[in-house]
Amino acid sequence: MTAASPKTVRAELAEALAASRAAREGAERELHRSVALRSRAAEALERTARRPGLDESERAVLRAEYAAADRIVVQRRAAVDKAQEFERAASVVAGAFEAEAASASPLAAALLQLVGSKRSSTARRGALATGRTAPAARVRSPRPRSA
């Protein structure tokens, strides 16, 4: 395993931080959109509450729409929480690397080695995906076939 250079690690950590920030912002936009849709469904349901000659099947449809919108809000809120957690983790790792890289600490060395091993395993997976490996040897079964 080869260790990556500090410059490479800094660049990859910056990319991870930017990607996590973009993912969080996207998740927040989707959450706001789904909250707005849920609010519209709630308003439609409330408008029918006091209407004379109320058709109960129409109310059931509106309740189902609200329930579906609420489930989406819960899912999107979980996605925002996950994205925020990942962004915090990326920020902590990037900050720790910056603090420790100059002192040649074991943490910085471990991060350098991790990035280097990730690169070599990615290269190996790429070779496997393109079929640039030696063919496997065929092994015959040691048991005789029965008729």
Image (cartoon, rainbow, N blue to C red):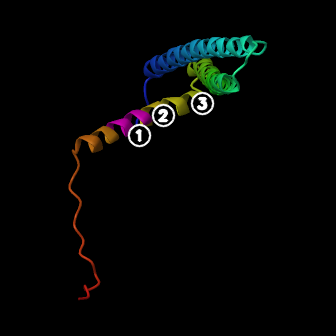
* Gap in angstroms between the C-alphas marked 1 and 3: 17 Å
Pick the residue in front: 140 or 53: 53
Q: Which mark is residue 35?
A: none
Q: In the rendered structure, which disc, 2 or 1, sits on the residue that comes first in sequence?
A: 1
Residue for badge 1: 1
Residue for badge 3: 107
Q: In the rendered structure, which disc, 1 or 3, sits on the residue that comes first in sequence?
A: 1
Q: Which mark is residue 113?
A: 2
Amino acid type at image mark 1? Met
Q: Main secondary structure of the magenta part?
A: helix
Pick the residue in front: 101 or 53: 53
Pick the residue in front: 65 or 87: 65
Q: Are marks 2 and 1 in contact (CB under 8 Å)?
A: yes
Mark 3 closeness class: few <14, some 14–19, many ≥20 residues within 10 Å: some
Pick the residue in front: 46 or 128: 46
* Gap in angstroms between the C-alphas marked 2 and 1: 7 Å
Residue 7 point in image, percent of width and height: 44, 18
Quadrant of image for the C terminus: bottom left
Write the start and end of the magenta stretch as one range. Answer: 118-123
Amino acid type at image mark 2? Gln
Identify the image quadrant of residue 93. Answer: top right
Furthest toward the bottom, the residue is 147
Identify the image quadrant of residue 129. Answer: top left
Q: Residue drawn at (59%, 12%), measured in percent from left and top? A: 33
